[in-house]
Amino acid sequence: QVHLVESGGGSVQSGESLRLSCAASGFTFSSFVVRWFRQVPGKERELVAGISGGGTNTNYADSVKGRFTISRDNAENMAYLQMNNLGPEDTAVYYCNAYLYATYYWGQGTQVTVAP
C-alpha cells in the first residue's frame, strides 16, 4: 500500500528549530517530486518547498527562504524539511506530498506550533 507519513512536528518557541520527516512506502519514491505544504484553519494550503526526484533542484516559498531546507534520502525513502528560526507565522499543519505526472500522494500531516 502507498503511504506517506509525516513526523517531527511539535510545539516550540520563536527562534527554535524543528526537522520534519516524511517516510514513503509502496511506490518508487525516487521517481517522484516531493513537496512540503502547510495549512492553517480557514486558509488555503500553501506550498512551502519542493525537491526534484534526484534531489538536485529545490524551490522555496519566499516566506521561508533562508530558514527552511528541503532534502531527501532516496535510499531510505525519506524526505525532510529542516525549519530554523521558527516564528508564530509558521504555525500550521505540515503535509508531505509526492507527485509524478498525474499521480499525487499525501500524508496525514504533522502539527507545528510556534509560541509568539
Image (cartoon, rainbow, N blue to C red):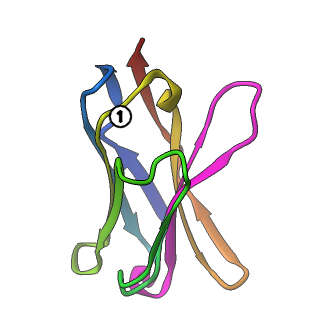
Q: Secondary structure at mark 1?
A: loop
Could you tell whether 82 is left or right of 1 in the image? Answer: left
Where does residue 108 sit, x and y in percent of width and height?
53, 44
Give the residue drawn at x 42%, y 22%: 113
Give the residue drawn at x 52%, y 27%: 89
Residue lying at the far top of the rendered structure: 116
Query: In the displayed structure, would residue 90 be above or below residue 67?
Result: above
The magenta segment is: 28-49
Where does residue 63 sit, x and y in percent of width and height?
53, 45
Number of marks in picture: 1
Could you tell whether 1 is left or right of 43 in the image? Answer: left
Residue linked to disc 1 = 9
Give the residue drawn at x 35%, y 34%: 9
Tell me if residue 33 can be seen.
yes
Whether the magenta-drawn stretch holds residue 24 is answered as: no
Task: Pick the residue in front: 73 or 52.
Answer: 52
Task: Pick the residue in front: 82 or 7.
Answer: 82
The quadrant the C terminus occupies is top left
Query: In the displayed structure, would residue 26 be above or below residue 39?
Result: below
Whether the magenta-drawn stretch holds residue 29 is answered as: yes
Give the residue drawn at x 40%, y 48%: 6
Where does residue 99 sit, x and y in percent of width and height?
59, 75
Tell me if residue 1 can be seen.
no
The amino acid at mark 1 is Gly
Assess disc 1: are there few (<14), some (14-19) or many (≥20) residues with their C-alpha within 10 Å of its C-alpha: some
Where does residue 25 sit, x and y in percent of width and height?
39, 69
